[in-house]
Image (spheres, grey):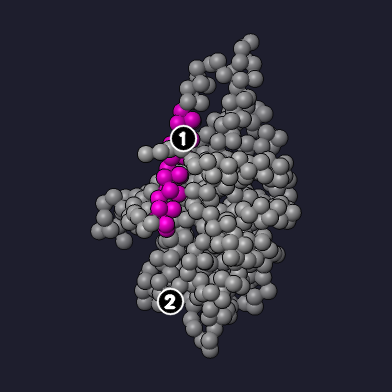
């Protein structure tokens, strides 16, 4: 057993950190306040090779494995703890990887180079107003007609709607293709957003990660070419689970990035800040909290990198069953957002009143990681259900 990163991975982390310190961290406040990631930041991220990082070189990506992609997620979220840039990055890395695996060659050629170049956004459109947790009950319909795919329905709480509508790009969209069946009646297709007839969008005001929008996509008999079907008809549920596993691992990595950065600044602060004529760091009440938070961070990290490592072994060597992967990813995604929230909250309190100001910037992190406690990329109870099912067996699923 070896818990260290390779030299190549360490060098990669160092170079991403340098890049993020120069190009992203100085813009983090602006991203939150203006409510968008400035396009020059996205261009810089693309030029550095961060956007669509898991996509092959052939389409302009790095073909990074998930350990490498997790390192980048961690570093991006360190630089922008609001999580906005990390969300932009990780959604594309997770679902871009899935597109490359299952989309048709023609769709890959058309879509993927724009993602890696930062000219198009790629997201996931699963959730509907009836509830995001029960993916099998999705009611957006897709039919084949006259050589086209016709899609009718609505998706809500979707990340990046404004970005896809402005920049171009679209969504890996989960649709129902056999209404008689639940999960075995689902398929995936790519739906472009900008200038597509029959699409209307709207944006929510949200409590955090202001730099990336969350919105609604209404599809009123939207027509897309047949080659936008992703994988086999009626097999979409299984591809979606695979995509969620990829994206969730990177979500968890981003959460530990934000938490790690907050904890570092908390340590610096408690060493400098004097209360009762001595440094805050000398008080055991604070030290004990720090120790607990450090354990939370380190254990979250282990779960994240174990999940990434397992995904990499699965894709490279065919190791690990779906059960093992599902369980490992769900543990990482369940644990990291809550750990990050707790850590950032503690650091905020160590800062005293200053922690409550926007100037300190810590509240950005709290608001950002909260999105992953609520449910972005899967609600926490769903992670618990997955872990329970994979420990007990499918016969213990309550539905
Ligand atoms: C900021 C943000 C961005 C998002 N981006 C996207 C996106 O890009 N694409 C996308 O498709 N979706 C996105 N979502 C939606 C997200 O996937 C859903 O919020 C999530 O799947 C939960 O669905 P829901 O919100 O409808 O809650 P519900 O499914 O209604 O669940 C509500 C609560 O009930 C709990 N619950 C549900 N079922 C069970 C059960 N069987 N047992 C016990 N408890 C249960 C859940 O844990 C949750 O706490 C985003 C959400 C947020 C907050």
Of 81 and 12, nearer the camera is 12
Q: State yes or no: discs 1 and 2 in contact (Cβ < 8 Å).
A: no
Badge 2, how many Cα within 10 Å: few under 14, some, many 20+?
some
Q: Please say whether residue 203 is one of the residues in the magenta stretch.
A: no
Q: Is residue 221 visible?
A: no
Q: Is mark 2 within 8 Å of ligand 1?
A: no
Report the residue marked by disc 2: 233
Q: Report the residue at 64% width, 16% height from top.
A: 274
Between discs 1 and 2, the one toward the N terminus: 2
Q: Is residue 51 visible?
A: yes
Q: Secondary structure at mark 2?
A: loop
**Residue most extreme to the top:** 277
- Image quarter where the N terminus lies is top left
Which image quarter: residue 200? bottom right
Residue 173: horizontal and vertical position, in percent?
A: 52, 68
Q: Which residues are magenta?
A: 292-316
Badge 1, how many Cα within 10 Å: few under 14, some, many 20+?
some
Measured along the vertical axis of the image, is residue 144 above or below residue 364? Answer: below
Q: Report the residue at 57% width, 79% height from top.
A: 224
Measured along the vertical axis of the image, is residue 286 above or below residue 207? Answer: above
The tag on residue 298 is 1
- Image quarter where the C terminus lies is bottom left
**Distance from Cα at disc 1 to Cα at disc 2:** 42 Å
Measured along the vertical axis of the image, is residue 109 above or below residue 44? Answer: below
Q: Secondary structure at mark 1?
A: helix
The tag on residue 158 is none
Q: Is mark 1 within 8 Å of ligand 1?
A: no
**Residue most extreme to the bottom:** 146
Is 5 left, or right, of 353 in this rendering? left
């Amino acid at each position: 057993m070896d818990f260290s990163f390779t030299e190549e991975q360490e060098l990669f982390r160092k170079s991403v950190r340098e890049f993020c310190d120069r190009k992203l961290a100085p813009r983090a406040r602006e991203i939150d306040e203006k409510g968008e990631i400035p396009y020059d930041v996205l261009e810089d991220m693309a030029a550095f090779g961060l956007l669509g990082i898991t996509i092959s070189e052939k389409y302009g990506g790095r073909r990074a494995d998930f350990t490498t992609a997790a390192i980048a997620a961690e570093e991006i979220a360190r630089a922008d703890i609001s999580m906005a840039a990390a969300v932009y990055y990780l959604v594309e890395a997770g679902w871009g990887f899935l597109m490359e695996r299952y989309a048709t060659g023609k769709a890959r050629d058309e879509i993927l180079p724009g993602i890696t170049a930062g000219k198009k956004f790629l997201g996931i459109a699963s959730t509907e107003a009836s509830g995001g947790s029960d993916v099998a009950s999705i009611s957006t319909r897709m039919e084949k007609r006259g050589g086209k795919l016709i899609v009718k329905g609505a998706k809500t709480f979707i990340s990046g709607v404004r970005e896809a509508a402005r920049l171009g790009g679209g969504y890996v969209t989960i649709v129902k293709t056999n209404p008689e069946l639940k999960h075995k009646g689902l398929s995936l297709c790519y739906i472009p957003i900008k200038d597509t007839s029959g699409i209307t969008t709207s944006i929510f005001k949200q409590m955090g990660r202001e730099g990336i929008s969350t919105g609604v996509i209404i599809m009123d008999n939207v027509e897309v070419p047949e080659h936008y079907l992703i994988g086999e008809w009626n097999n979409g549920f299984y591809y979606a689970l695979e995509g969620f596993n990829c994206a969730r691992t990177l979500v968890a990595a981003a959460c530990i990035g934000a938490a790690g950065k907050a904890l570092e600044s908390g340590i610096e602060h408690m060493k400098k800040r004097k209360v009762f004529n001595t440094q805050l760091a000398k008080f055991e009440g604070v030290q004990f909290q720090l120790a607990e938070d450090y354990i939370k961070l380190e254990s979250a990290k282990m779960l994240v990198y174990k999940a990434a490592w397992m995904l990499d072994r699965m894709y490279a060597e065919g190791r690990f069953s779906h059960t093992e992967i599902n369980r490992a990813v769900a543990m990482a995604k369940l644990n990291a957002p809550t750990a990050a929230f707790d850590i950032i909250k503690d650091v905020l309190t160590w800062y005293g009143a200053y922690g409550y100001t926007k100037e300190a910037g810590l509240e950005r992190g709290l608001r950002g990681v909260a999105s992953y406690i609520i449910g972005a990329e899967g609600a926490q109870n769903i992670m618990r259900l997955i872990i329970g099912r994979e420990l007990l067996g499918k016969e213990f699923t309550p539905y």
